Image (spheres, coloured by chain):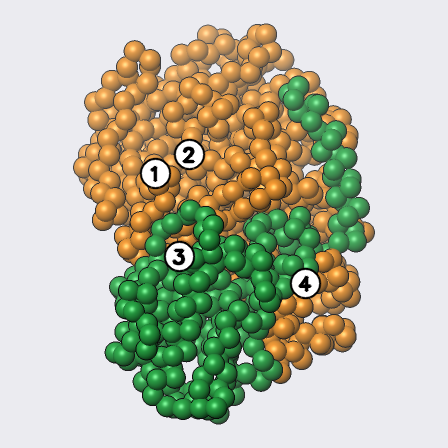
């Protein structure tokens, strides 16, 4: 199943070669006979790249990074602001909030600074002595205490004000106030300053932070536009009367933004694993029964889903997918965001991407539209200003978790009332968003997100292709230009297949290349979900390409790839696995009358987890139950199949 | 789905209640759930004493370079407050280490970042009195920011104050005159001379562990430290995590 390294290098070149793209990205669209025929009748040229108009490289980035402008990040000591965050993501060395020099192994291609919209910018302003804060007697008092060497007393006063609910209302940063506008403008200015088309894209964005009852329903809002449009509005917030905790109201805000400015925004739902069953409702939401309008509106605005981040991975859960031996990966299933409500198994179905995809098929039948037809990305949700989630270079979720021996044993969430306790070691060094865009600009990347031509990674920068069509044949996997064939004969990740031509079944051209400085690949799997004739939702995971000559056992499972991890030294070798996996797969269980989805999951060989690197670096013994190695992975956006009506 | 059907109305009611609460209750502006007051108090240090948390980075680097001992891995609860006692002992030893050479003239306050424990070192009658677990610095005090392992090493005579300052393991906050006085008086303290009455074994005991062992002691404070005072006046539900001097969260 493997190819040689030389071949892989060639293929890598083909997959990432530069080309002259059109100004605007194409829609992945739906493959039909006419489109396929036209594509195949194109006259050949000597250069195989003539006329190529599809994305040739994935751009890696982070759609969810907090800085000191976020209230919680600031409260926990984050001093890096948006400009620092963009500088770091571009590849510059910066000093972290705990004074540690930090630099990425490779620059990212894009970043969204997505600070919490509520109270955005409060802490930097307070300690900078901004006039608006000094105009308030309490703000003045705190500032004077700090300046007169009574900073500790000021800190007490601030903490008490938060904890007791006596925080002066005049110090709150609400939309419509000058300081809030100022913070938003500063956010915009930082993005515009560091946005450098074709080198680094700095998106304007924010995180809408619905958190009622401790249930995480956050969304990251990303602007396609520059500051001239984004500055015409202020971010949507949660606290009434200015905002709302209901996503429906966020979607109204997004609609209003586009109407007002002619611009474009999309929302990415936060990993739902801490929503305690509320992220993907199937009956009602916020007291209102789901209807077609809900489905259409959600589908319109929420194009992507954050399936992996520092607070765990939300692709699948072993309780929901007991036959999937890879489902138990960086799982957080103990409670909601603040640990105030412990998790129950019945909540899980409404939190994980795979079950949402399945329920979406059912909802489509009931409502006429699938509200959960989203693509997949990963991002960090780091609150440090540092999009640093490489295992050997992990700067943690929050400032208290920046590199230190203490993070091997400290608790991250500990709610004695409910018994929900999550340790720092459980925080995941994950993830990044990979976007198949034509070029590195706000417009091109945003368009690719909008059409869901994206995949999530848990930190690896492996290159993953996933094409679906009716006519892929085994020889296509031997071609050194798989994307040429993929786009010509099919649709990429995020696309649609519909109304199977007579007698045909879906075929998939899959290809993956290892991260150039990362681990080899174990296997490429296709995850299929469908609704059967009885209306029951089903799922199955197929191994479609793998390293070595392993044979499936009686249970249909491929044996493990092996393990070269040297935990004591936090290292591994690429003597197992494959640098490249390419295959054509044909669905052996296809029924043209049943709706389905398919997505790719690519798994690396085992490597040391950040905990292993820290144990070695700091000379500390990990806790007995700490996870010390992992198999990094990528999840593609699905391709959906819709039967003929 | 059945479970969800039954469960959601209750959640909706909670949501409504929470929304009403939110309207009048600013604390939830802290959007995420990892908000114990110790972490917040420590985080605030980075603002009120600019870059105070750089000490944590310096300590991490020193541990990685094996200049400082690594904290022990022990997640077991400390039912008898032995961690606190060891930390308090280490602070007393630290005071004696500073008191070793010269008659001190400068009072100052020190905060250990891991447990956010304040200690005042009061110069009086030619001695340096040590008051562990005070509410915070006295007005106009010179403030030292450091960590448990650093104090243990200074007390054990294995680390000079001057070296600790050079490595960023101790940071000073005060007037330039105060800083100069402190450095002039104490820079050689801790250099190869264990404090009187301190066994090396004690000084080498794991400060990170000791501080965490202090947790239960802190839960019933005789006087309130910065975070204990805040937490004692807080509503637990809003801070979500551990209240008052929880385990070190770095």
**Above or below for B139 versus B84:** below
Q: Earlier in the sequence, mark 1 or mark 2?
A: 2
Res A456 → quadrant:
top left
Badge 1: how crowded within 10 Å, few (<14), some, or many (20+)?
Answer: some
Q: Which chain letter matches label 1?
A: A
Badge 3: how crowded within 10 Å, few (<14), some, or many (20+)?
Answer: many
User: Which residue bears the numbered disc 2?
Assistant: A329
Chain B's shade in the image?
green
User: Which residue bears the numbered disc 3?
Assistant: B209
Q: Which chain letter matches label 2?
A: A
Badge 4: how crowded within 10 Å, few (<14), some, or many (20+)?
Answer: many
Query: Residue A160's mark?
Result: 4
**Distance between mark 1 and mark 4 Cα atoms:** 41 Å
**Above or below for A529 versus A106:** above
Q: Which chain is orange?
A: A
Residue at 39% across, 34% down: A465
Residue at 63% across, 59% down: B231
User: Which residue bears the numbered disc 1?
Assistant: A630
């Amino acid at each position: 199943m493997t190819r040689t390294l030389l071949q892989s290098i060639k293929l890598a070149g083909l997959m990432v070669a530069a080309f002259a793209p059109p100004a605007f990205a194409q829609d992945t669209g739906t493959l039909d006979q006419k489109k396929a025929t036209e594509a195949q009748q194109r006259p050949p040229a000597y250069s195989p790249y003539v006329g190529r108009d599809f994305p040739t490289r994935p751009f890696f980035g982070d759609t969810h990074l907090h800085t000191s402008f976020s209230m919680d990040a600031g409260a926990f000591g984050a001093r890096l602001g948006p400009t620092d965050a963009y500088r770091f993501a571009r590849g510059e060395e910066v000093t972290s909030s705990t004074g540690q020099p930090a630099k990425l192994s490779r620059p990212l291609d894009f970043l969204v600074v997505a600070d919490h919209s509520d109270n955005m910018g409060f802490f930097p302003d307070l300690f900078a002595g901004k006039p608006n804060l000094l105009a308030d007697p309490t703000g003045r008092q705190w500032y004077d205490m700090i300046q007169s060497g009574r900073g500790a007393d000021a800190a007490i006063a601030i903490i008490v004000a938060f904890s007791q609910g006596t925080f002066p209302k005049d110090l709150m940063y609400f939309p419509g106030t000058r300081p809030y506008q100022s913070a938003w403008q500063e956010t915009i200015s930082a993005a515009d300053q560091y946005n450098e088309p074709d080198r680094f894209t700095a998106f304007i964005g924010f995180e809408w932070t619905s958190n009622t009852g401790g249930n995480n329903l956050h969304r990251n809002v990303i602007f396609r536009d520059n500051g001239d449009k984004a500055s015409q509005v202020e971010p949507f917030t949660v606290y009434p009367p200015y905002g709302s905790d209901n996503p429906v109201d966020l979607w109204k805000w997004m609609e209003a933004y586009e109407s007002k400015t002619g611009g474009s925004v999309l929302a990415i739902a936060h990993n739902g694993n801490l929503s305690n069953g509320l992220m993907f409702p199937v009956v009602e939401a916020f007291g209102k029964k789901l209807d077609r309008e809900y489905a259409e509106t959600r589908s319109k605005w929420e194009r992507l889903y954050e399936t992996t981040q520092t607070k765990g991975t939300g692709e699948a859960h072993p309780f929901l997918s007991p036959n999937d031996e890879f489902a138990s990966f960086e799982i957080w299933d103990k409670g909601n965001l603040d640990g105030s409500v412990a998790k129950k198994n019945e909540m899980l179905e409404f939190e994980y991407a795979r079950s949402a995809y399945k329920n979406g098929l059912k909802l489509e039948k009931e409502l006429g539209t699938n509200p959960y037809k989203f693509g997949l990305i990963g991002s960090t949700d780091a609150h440090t200003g540092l999009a640093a989630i490489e295992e050997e270079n992990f700067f943690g979720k929050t400032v208290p978790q920046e590199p230190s021996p203490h993070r091997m044993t400290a608790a991250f969430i500990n709610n004695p009332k409910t018994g929900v306790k999550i340790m720092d070691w459980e925080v995941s060094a994950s993830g990044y968003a990979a976007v198949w865009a034509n070029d590195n600009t706000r417009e091109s990347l945003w368009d690719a997100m909008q059409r869901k031509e994206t995949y999530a990674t848990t930190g690896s920068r492996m290159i993953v292709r996933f094409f679906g069509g009716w006519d892929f044949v085994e020889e296509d996997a031997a071609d050194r230009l798989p994307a040429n064939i993929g786009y010509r004969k099919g649709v990429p990740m995020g696309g649609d297949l519909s109304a199977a031509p007579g007698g045909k079944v879906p075929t998939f051209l899959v290809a993956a290349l290892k991260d150039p400085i990362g681990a080899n690949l174990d296997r490429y799997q296709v995850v299929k979900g469908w609704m059967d004739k009885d209306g029951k939702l089903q799922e199955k995971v197929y191994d479609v390409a793998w390293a070595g000559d392993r044979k499936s056992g009686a249970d249909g499972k491929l044996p493990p790839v092996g393990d070269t991890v040297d935990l004591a030294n936090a290292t591994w070798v690429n003597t197992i696995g494959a640098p490249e996996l390419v295959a054509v797969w044909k669905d052996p269980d296809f029924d043209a009358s049943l709706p389905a989805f398919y997505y790719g999951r690519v798994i690396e060989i085992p490597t040391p987890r950040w905990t292993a690197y820290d144990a070695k670096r700091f000379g500390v013994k990990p806790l007995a139950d700490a996870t010390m190695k992992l198999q990094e992975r990528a999840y593609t956006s699905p391709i959906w199949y819709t039967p003929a009506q | 789905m059945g479970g969800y059907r039954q469960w959601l109305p209750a959640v909706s009611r909670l949501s409504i209640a929470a929304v009403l609460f939110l309207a009048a209750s600013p604390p939830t502006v802290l959007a995420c759930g990892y908000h114990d007051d110790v972490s917040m108090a420590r985080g605030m240090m980075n603002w009120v004493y600019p870059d105070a948390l750089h000490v944590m980075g310096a300590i991490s680097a020193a541990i990685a370079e094996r200049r400082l001992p690594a904290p022990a891995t022990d997640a077991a609860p400390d039912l008898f407050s032995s961690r606190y006692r060891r930390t308090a002992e280490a602070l007393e030893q630290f005071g004696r280490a500073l008191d070793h050479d010269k008659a001190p003239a400068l009072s100052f306050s020190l905060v250990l970042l891991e447990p956010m424990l304040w200690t005042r070192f009061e110069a009086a009658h030619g001695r340096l009195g040590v008051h562990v677990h005070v509410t915070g610095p006295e007005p106009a005090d010179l403030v030292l920011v450091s960590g448990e392992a650093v104090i243990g090493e200074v007390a054990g005579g294995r680390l000079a104050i001057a070296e600790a300052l050079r490595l960023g393991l101790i940071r000073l906050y005060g007037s330039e005159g105060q800083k100069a006085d402190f450095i002039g008086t104490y820079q050689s303290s801790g250099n190869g001379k264990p404090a009187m009455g301190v066994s090396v074994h004690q000084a080498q005991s794991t400060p990170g562990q000791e501080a965490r062992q202090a947790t239960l002691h802190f839960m019933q404070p005789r006087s309130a430290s910065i975070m204990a005072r805040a937490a004692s006046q807080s509503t637990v539900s809003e801070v979500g995590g551990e209240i008052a001097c929880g385990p070190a969260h770095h």
